[in-house]
Image: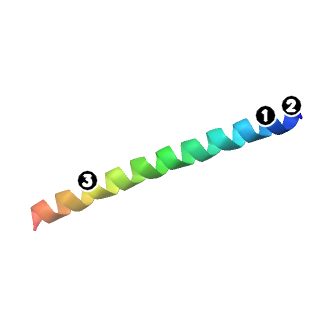
Amino acid sequence: METLGVIGFIFALAALSMVLQQKKVIETIKKEVDELKKKK
């Protein structure tokens, strides 16, 4: 039973880190798009 808890904990951490990475990627893309719009 404890191993399931550990696996679940690791899975939750991995999911959380993936979400945080996606947010960072989206933010950088938005910044790049804004900069491109300013240049035009």
Looking at numbered disc 3 in the image, what kind of residue is underneath it? Lys
Secondary structure of residue under mark 1: helix
Residue nearest the viewer, comparing 24 with 16: 16
Q: Disc 2 vs disc 3: Cβ atoms closer than 8 Å?
A: no
Residue 1: x, y in percent?
89, 35
- Residue drawn at x 55%, y 48% is 18
- Residue drawn at x 84%, y 39% is 4
- Which of the marked residues, 1 or 3, is nearer the chain's N terminus? 1
- Which of the marked residues, 2 or 3, is nearer the chain's N terminus? 2
Q: Is residue 14 above or below residue 6?
A: below
Q: Residues within 10 Å of mark 2 (few under 14, many from 20)?
A: few
Q: Distance between the residues labelled 1 and 3?
A: 38 Å
Residue 6, numbered circle: 1
Q: How far apart are marks 2 and 3 (CA)?
A: 44 Å
Secondary structure of residue under mark 2: helix
Residue nearest the viewer, comparing 27 with 12: 12
In which quadrant of the rendered view does residue 34 lie?
Answer: bottom left
Residue 23: x, y in percent?
42, 49
Q: Disc 1 vs disc 3: Cβ atoms closer than 8 Å?
A: no
Q: In this view, does 2 lie above or below 22?
A: above
Q: How crowded is mark 3: few (under 14 residues within 10 Å), some or many (20 or more)?
A: few
Q: Name the residue under label 2.
A: 2
Residue 31, numbered circle: 3
Query: For this view, does 27 lie left or right of residue 34?
Result: right
Query: For this view, does 24 lie left or right of residue 39?
Result: right
Looking at numbered disc 1 in the image, what kind of residue is underneath it? Val
